[in-house]
Image: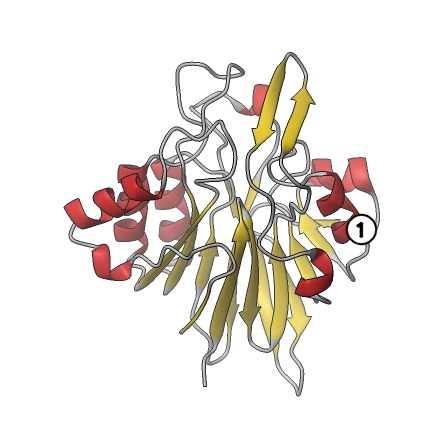
Amino acid sequence: MSTFGITYLGGPTAVIEYGGLRLLVDPTFDGPRDFPLGNRVLTKTVGPALTAAEVGPVDAVLLSHDQHPDNMDESGRAVALAAPQVLSTSSAEQRLGAPVRALPNWTSVTLSRPGGGEITVTGVPAQHGPDGSEPIVGEVTGFWLAGAGLPTVYVSGDNASLDVVRRIVDRLGTADIAVLFAGAARTPLVPDAPLTLTSPDAARAAELLAARHVVPLHFEHWAHFSEDGARLDAAFTAAGLADRLHRLAPGGHIAF
């Protein structure tokens, strides 16, 4: 019987099945369109592989941040606010209110598992761009999942920093499964550096984490990604990690 499953919906959005719970990551359910954001526009090129109705009920939402529409669009916001609870940043809690709950770095909450037991969700750092970019891009978080008899899982959120990954490993140890946001996102907001992991850095993060399985998210379906799935495949192959990478087609599911 699997202890971890993930269904990829597109962009940053996925449903993680973990310890009998269903966790929705960064809900984006709008169709393709432009999203004006300050003096720039983010363009969604492909809609979700499943509708929110097809996804069905979830136990919690893991929201890396709320301020960018490629991580929570208008339909995704409605889905999140209808969920039993949303774990996110302090900024998201202030902006959105209930059921959003702030999960500051290195703090944890427990979620009860069906039939008994619990899982622990810990907030971990994420840096959405180069050093010093947080005042520009805003607060972002990642997540660490653990539970008795379950694999440890790292969900990176929009993190671009390998130093952040090293800090997480130093504090929490290695992860069995890494869900890495990649794509080397680039926008005029920070024109000279990627806002998410490059493909080689995603492979290096997998090495640092000693992850046995890597599922990439957030590398396609938005126009501001500069590296696609083929670049991820090539980077993991070059690093000798091709067998660890599980790049799902939209709507695809894998379990371990």
The image quadrant where one finds the C terminus is: bottom left
Q: Which of 197 and 101 is in front in this view?
A: 197
* Residue 53 location (% of width, % of height): 73, 61
Q: From the viewer's perspective, is residue 138 above or below residue 204? A: above
Nearer the observer, 134 or 219:
219
Asked whether, in this view, residue 26 is left or right of residue 231, the answer is right
Left or right, 72 with respect to 179, comes to right
Residue named by callout 1: 81
Kind of residue indicated by mark 1: Leu
Mark 1: which secondary structure?
helix
Q: Residue at x 53, y 49 (%)?
A: 10
Q: Residue at x 39, y 34 (%)?
A: 161
Q: Can residue 135 be seen in this view?
A: no
Of the pair 142 and 202, the residue shown nearer to us? 202
Q: Which residue is drawn at 32% across and 60% down?
A: 211
The quarter of the displayed image where residue 55 is located: bottom right
Q: In this view, does 96 lie to the left or right of 144?
A: right
Question: Is residue 72 in view from this perspective?
Answer: yes
- Nearer the observer, 208 or 69: 69
